[in-house]
Structure formats: C-alpha cells, structure tokens
C-alpha cells in the first residue's frame, strides 16, 4: 500500500489531535505541537520540525529514545535481531545513580543499567522505575531493549490484558501491527 499525501495528512492530523489530549508528551513534542497550525498536515509538521531542529531549545530530551523502540521492528526481518539483542544485553551503574535521566544520555544509561542488573523483563522494568525521576521514559527505553533481548513471551499475561495503544488497539492488535511492520519490511 502506498500512502498518498492525503493519507499522511490524515495520519498526522489524527496523531496531533490525540497527543494534544494526553497528559505528558515532553517539552520538545509540546513545543513542536505549539508551532503547528490546525488542521495539521504533513508539510506543516515537517516545516515545524525543521524549524525546531534549526533553533533547539533544551534539546537532548529523553523522549526521542522512548519513541525509537518500534523502529527496530523494521529490521528484524533482515537478520539484524541478533545485533539488537546483544546491544540490549550491555552495561552500567544502578539507575538511581543517574540524577539527570530526563537527558537523553542518562536516560539510556539508566535503561541499560536496569537491563544489566536486572533478571528478566519484569525485574528490568522494576529497576528502571525504582531509579526515580523520569521513570516512565527510562522504563519505556529499558522495555524496548529488554523486549528485544527477552521477547514478547516475557511480558506477564496480566500486563498484556491491560496493555493498550492507539485508542481501540489492545495487546493483540499491537502485536499484529508489529508482525505487519516486519512482514512489510521483508518484502
């Protein structure tokens, strides 16, 4: 399926409407959204993004890493999963020792630390949260990496039942989207 500019405009507009209604999207995303006209189109999003990149205020937020986990799905079909898993199994100090985990580098260090010191997905995520401060983002980064290392089967059933994504999409729907992303990349 080829997405036309009209399709992309609708996707961007729907996402922008949804994200404006959530509690916390981070400083950079908020600044970018504030610069967008309504209705939002892809061209406006790209223009605002280019402007923001050229004039960064408080750049280096950890939300950038939090949103990159799904990007890896596109590479699973071409044999790079071993590299993703080995990268996910690396390194450092306990997460609580990183006081600036709202900054992208320390957020990644906190996530890797939780993975290094943790024993299985649940323990990794608990360690990421116990590290304190910006725990939702650190746990999201750790969860993406631990998910690559341990696989979807490591997610407890009770968590799967509570999981939801885009409105109306449950854990099974998210898994189906992941499979479709990998399949599309393989073609």
Image (cartoon, rainbow, N blue to C red):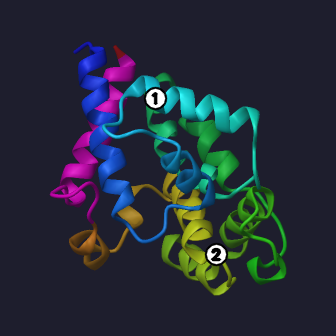
Quarter of the image with the N terminus in it: top left
Q: Nearer the viewer, residue 22 or 51?
A: 51
Residue 5: x %, y % from top left: 31, 16
Residue matched to label 2: 134
* Residue 119 visible at all: no
* Residue 105 visible at all: yes
* Quarter of the image where one finds residue 127: bottom right
* Side of 40 relative to 6 (left or right): right
Q: Nearer the viewer, residue 15 or 133?
A: 15
Residue neighbourhood size for the residue with mark 2, other residues' Cα within 10 Å, grouped as few (<14), some (14–19), many (≥20): some
Predominant SS of the magenta segment:
helix
Query: Who comes first in sequence, dot 2 or dot 1?
Result: 1
The residue sitting at the front extreme is 37
Q: In this view, does 176 lie above or below 181?
A: below
Q: How far apart are marks 2 and 1 (CA)?
A: 30 Å
* Side of 44 relative to 26 (left or right): left
Q: What element carries label 2?
A: loop
Residue at the image position 60 percent from the left and 76 percent from the top: 135
Residue matched to label 1: 44
Give the magenta-colored segment's residue range: 164-186
Q: In this view, does 132 lie above or below 71?
A: below
Residue at the image position 55 percent from the left and 46 percent from the top: 32
* Quarter of the image where one finds residue 37: top left
Is residue 168 located in the magenta-colored stretch of the structure? yes
Residue at the image position 26 percent from the left and 64 percent from the top: 164
Q: Which of 45 and 145 is in front in this view?
A: 45
């Amino acid at each position: 399926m080829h997405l036309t500019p009209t399709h992309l405009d609708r996707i961007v507009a729907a996402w922008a409407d949804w994200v404006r209604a959530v509690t916390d999207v981070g400083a950079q995303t908020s600044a970018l959204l504030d610069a967008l006209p309504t209705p939002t189109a892809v061209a406006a999003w790209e223009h605002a993004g280019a402007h923001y990149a050229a004039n960064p205020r408080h750049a280096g937020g950890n939300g950038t890493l939090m949103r990159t986990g799904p990007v890896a799905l596109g590479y699973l079909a071409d044999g790079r999963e071993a590299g993703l898993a080995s990268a996910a199994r690396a390194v450092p100090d306990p997460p609580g020792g990183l006081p600036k985990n709202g900054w992208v580098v320390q957020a990644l260090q906190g996530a890797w630390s939780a993975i290094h010191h943790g024993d299985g997905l649940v323990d990794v995520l608990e360690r990421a949260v116990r590290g304190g401060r910006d725990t939702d983002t650190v746990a999201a980064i750790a969860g993406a990496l631990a998910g690559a290392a341990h696989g979807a089967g490591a997610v407890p059933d009770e968590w799967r039942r509570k999981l939801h994504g885009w409105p109306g999409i449950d854990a099974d729907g998210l898994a189906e989207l992941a499979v479709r992303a990998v399949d599309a990349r393989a073609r």
